[in-house]
Amino acid sequence: MKEKILYIPNQDEYLKVSAINNKIIRFHFSKDKEWRHNYSFAIEKEIIPIDLFSEESENEFLISTSFLKISMDKNNGSIKIYDRENNCILADYENLGYKRVDKKVYCYKEIKGEVAFLGFGERTGDLNKKGKKLINWNTDNPHHTPDVDHLYQSHPFFLAWNPQVSYGIFFDNTYRSYFDMGRENENYYYFFAEDGELDYYFIYGPTPKEVIEGYTELTGRCYLPPMWALGYQQSRWSYKDENEVKKIAERFKEEDIPCNVIYLDIDYMDGFRVFTIDKNKFPNFEKMIEELNKEGFRVVPIIDPGVKKDDSYEVYKEGIEKNYFCKKENGEIFVGHVWPGESVFPNFVREEVRKWWGEKQRILVEKGISGIWNDMNEPSIIPSFDYKMMRLLFYHLKFKEPPRVPSFLEKEDFYSKTLSADVVHGENREFTHDEIHNVYGLLMAKASFNGWRDAKPEERPLIITRAGFSGIQKYSAVWTGDNKSTWEHLYMSIIMLQNLGISGVPFIGADVGGFWGDCEPELFARWIELGIFYPFFRNHSAINTKNQEPWEFGEHIEDIARRYIKLRYKLMPYLYSLFYEAKEKGTPILRSLILEFPKDPNAIKYEDEFMFGPSFLVAPIYEKGKNERDVYLPEGTWYNFWNNETFKGPNIIKVEAPLDIIPIFVKAGSIIPMRGEENKIELRVYPGEGEFLYYEDDGISWDYEKGIYNLVRFSLSKDKLNIEYIHKGFKETKFITSTI
Ligand code: GLC
């Protein structure tokens, strides 16, 4: 049997249960046995349910897989999920496993004992969301603080963890949805959506890493970014012209600071028209890129979804002719204000439109760019009055931060200004904006990625996006939007990135140095020290703020920045191998402690530390004037990275952290592949027991998909290092070993 359909008398609805594999169970409810939601924006691969074993007694249906047993009450549909040892992992709360109120669909589950809830995508505030309410509605909020909820991305997924067992829930519904994790009542949590179907997946661990593996089995995993995309990247809104861009690049060379990417923000365009170039500011755009490429810099321009409404502009004209822009129910094209003024928005749900967009991208790809930066794709619009005010304040009064919303206007959704609710999407206007809003950015990133593969099939791109939904990791890296040059925002990034990683998105980062406001030297130093552990490592700052390149803060800070950026490059073979693991299993690179120490009940308490892969424990400094901090070391032996002093965990130790030191500890038994001299890989061995999978390929092409790569297992036992090729498809590397 592939699926079980059960009638729920108290709701007069049907439940269809199927298993995607032995650990993932899908629960899908329907009023009329139609299960309209037979597509998914997040899960794109074909899902073939496995065979289920079923039994029936007077009051319940039982289905089982080799890991799980699911019991469903025949009278009220109540669900209980057990593991092989008959421990109940999850149960519906009372009979509320399914509830419908008008269009809204709800699901209530019991909270029993100690449990932490993590994930939920890009979230500020504490790591553990127990007792919190979370909303999924992609929102451009340039003023976000730790207490602000929904931001640019929506990931209706969470991981429930306790030291015994972890499981995940993915609520595959794109409408505005809500999770109340024991806030209303500590005995239950519930999730609901404004519309659509109750269609969710239970993902069994038992470890948190296995939950993420299961979740990304469904929603997909990242591709291997080109190796250069893991280096340091420099951005600013905006480097104003060709000369400035070149000068920035030259300066990096002069200062001996490695940098791989320079970004072009909105001002490279002609009047903010996408796919155009301002010929006055960039008269030799192609040549500039060619020269920069020769010097080892890549160029990544911004592309926003809003297309300027302008009858003399080709992209607009073509889109109108072909009927490619979003319309309202009454058939009128929706017009909203963004940077170019009045703009229209591609109907990205349609494959044809995504293809067209991808083709347009070719204009820039052929000029030599190396990636695409997608922004404002929540989609964000600014109502006409605000738009005029904002431009006035930003450009003319040189505001360092966007104007604050007057308090009489401050309401929850002030910033989620987006296409109006009467906008319809799709081929035949089959989707309301409510359903598409949260996936608009995902669809744009998909268009960018696929367009890239068509236009330049020989090279992997760097695609980055601000908005996204579950599954975004397949197409793009994610940065956390408009943060501030403050200590609070440096701290927030530590939490946001841990939760985004748990949500299946490994290639992530926050604007290093902070976006809004002037960054002070001490903050900059601390942020670079932390930033080298962001999987996506980019310094970006806003218009009218003080320049934020590493040399802007005096010699001492620049030295610190140089040293740390170089350390990032030294660690590249380790980092690239972690990306391989992310590609294979979805495992985040920047990891919450619970991922490496799932049985340690204390691991959840130290959210201000994280693991960088399996080996490094990083404990950032996030307060002004601080030069020491407490560090929790989980069980095992740890080496202080800076002086190799050893410590035994579990323990809390006090560590000195002068301005040029971020506390880093390496787990005993680690084998860290680092860049050595003459293209050799230096294996730094930290005595103990352990292993590491080292991955290498050409770092640039898609050849790895054809097996052209090496996978090497390093294992360390009784201080003896063993090197074993698991896959040899690429030229051999020379390893040199150094034991500390
Ligand atoms: C948005 C982006 C920011 C960018 C700016 C101008 O605020 O989040 O990164 O610099 O728009 O394009």
Image (spheres, rainbow, N blue to C red):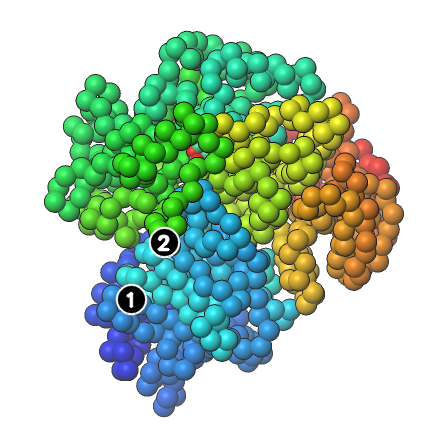
List x then y, in percent, for residue 468.
41, 45
| Quadrant where the image shows the N terminus | bottom left
Give the crowd class for mark 1: few <14, some 14-19, many >=20 residues within 10 Å: some
Residue marked by disc 1: 104
Give the crowd class for mark 2: few <14, some 14-19, many >=20 residues within 10 Å: few
Q: Is mark 1 within 8 Å of ligand 1?
A: no
Residue marked by disc 2: 411
Label 2, secondary structure: give it.
Answer: loop
Q: In the rendered picture of this protein, how many numbered marks are placed on residues?
A: 2
Left or right side of 328 for 646: right
Mark 2 vs mark 1: which is more N-terminal? 1
Q: How far apart in space, not on screen, are marks 2 and 1 (Cα)? A: 23 Å
The answer to the question of whether label 2 and label 1 lie on touching residues, with beta carbons closer than 8 A, is no
Label 1, secondary structure: give it.
Answer: strand
In this rendered view, identify the residue nearer to me: 20 or 652. Answer: 652
- Mark in the foreground, 2 or 1: 2
Kind of residue at badge 1: Lys
Placement of 307 over or under 621, stated as above or below: above
Q: Residue at x 60, y 34 (%)?
A: 519
In this rendered view, identify the residue nearer to me: 390 or 612. Answer: 390
Q: Residue at x 31, y 77 (%)?
A: 6
Q: Residue at x 18, y 34 (%)?
A: 323
